[in-house]
Image (cartoon, rainbow, N blue to C red):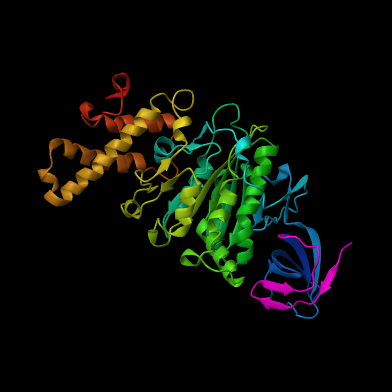
Amino acid sequence: MIIEYVGVKEINGSLVVIDGVKGVSYEEIVDIRLDSGTVRQGRIVQIEGDRIVVQVFEGTRDVSLENTTTRLTGHPMEMPLSPEIVGRILNGSGKPIDGLGDIYPVTKRDINGTAINPVSRIYPRNFINTGISSIDTLSTLIRGQKLPIFSGSGMKHNELAVQIVRQAKITGADENNFGVVFAAMGVKNDVADYFKKSFEEAGVMQHVTMLLNLSNDPIIERTLTPRCALTVAEYLAFELNMHILVIMTDMTSYAEALREFSSSKGEIPGRKGYPGYLYSDLASMYERAGMIKGSTGSLTQIPILTMPNDDITHPVPDLTGYITEGQIVLDRGLQNQGIYPPVNVLPSLSRLMKDGIGEGFTRADHPSLSNQLFASYAKVIDARSLASVIGEEELSETDKKYIEFGRQFENTFVNQGFDENRDISQSLDLGWKLLSTLPRTELDRVDDELLDKYYGK
């Protein structure tokens, strides 16, 4: 039996309070009918005895305390899913906005999902080729991994996201079974248009599903967007056996929406005003990435987040770093030098790359080359520090070679064109070409067999 409740007790921002409600459940969806006949949706976010707090998605403007009718649906928010969702553009709550009509669902799934049971996980092995040397060679993205990009306000993370969507591919028999779910949260209209136009012009829209939450959309929708995106990705990956890459930008916008929502509920704030459950909230989304037994598909995540004031200890990047398997860090100093993508390779790492590179995956020399490039670039930083004290002219010949190696490494290896797509062999060969500018005796992370084969070639 469907029960309707007339009137609300109080209204606070996007929240309405209703008394005398029985038999409800947390996260249940409700329909709210206004005096004008307009129906808005909301979800139950708090239950105290027979009092419930409902979060209204479209806001509470024109909601009346007396004549508003609330109807319980008996289920949480669900996402309609079918294979035709690939290539579509949706709003932040999963409704089509591309003018191509509704999606006729084959099934519906609760957007809240669950983290993958560790017992059901398959260890990630194969890599995803992004066509970007600094990522593919030194912080390799593995299928089923969650690898965030730490950026800063005004940096080129949007361009990097577009380039990854355009160029990302997998090799082998499954290469035609690859797709991307792209979720943008709190972006301006011109940025949303840039994303759509870039994907259409590159001809990749047919394997991309986009969810766009604009900056002038309700913040409530922003808290739903990543969960809707991950629900789509889980369906494609684990029911249709596709290999799905999920890119979510910007997770800081999501966290700020969560902070605003938490504040309106009157919850006690934690660090910098964020709710105390921010860690578990982020983990509930990040841990939906992986590969599971019984499915040949995979779900890989690249969450992008901007660090306020470029502070990597800020709660959002700090907690993200605890949950995910590495990070790619963008550096403002490199961007100011005109280097794109401005990836700072030393603080960047991929904790799963060791098991997804090498013979049978990329190339046999990849692990040794990666280690040597890291070690050599670390010595470049030491040489630059010394040069800032005594001057470059006073450095030893070896240190001068490292200074020159650092310049070439940043200008030819890290730096590449927005339209430049390098396969893994090109990136590895370029790495060897750079290492060959250093004395052979300095290459102590590579065995003689590999040096004989690649050094100076």
| Quadrant assignment for the C terminus | top left
Residue at the location (42% across, 57% down)? 152
Residue closer to the observer: 292 or 62: 292
Residue 207 against residue 32 in the figure, above or below = above
Residue closer to the observer: 260 or 440: 260
Using the rendered image of the protein, determine whether residue 285 is visible from the camera's viewpoint: yes
Asked whether, in this view, residue 13 is left or right of residue 407, the answer is: right
**Residue farthest right in this picture:** 1
Q: Is residue 12 magenta?
A: yes
What's the magenta region? 1-27
**Residue 188: percent from the left, percent from the top?**
54, 63
Asked whether, in this view, residue 133 is left or right of residue 107, the answer is: left
**Residue 110: percent from the left, percent from the top?**
71, 51
Q: Quadrant of residue 383?
A: top left
Residue at the location (34% across, 48% down)? 339
Using the rendered image of the protein, determine whether residue 159 is visible from the camera's viewpoint: no
| Quadrant assignment for the N terminus | bottom right
**Residue farthest front in this picture:** 49
Asked whether, in this view, residue 36 is left or right of residue 450, the answer is: right
Asked whether, in this view, residue 26 is left or right of residue 349, the answer is: right
Q: Main secondary structure of the magenta part?
A: loop
Residue closer to the observer: 233 or 409: 233
Residue at the location (60% across, 39% down)? 118
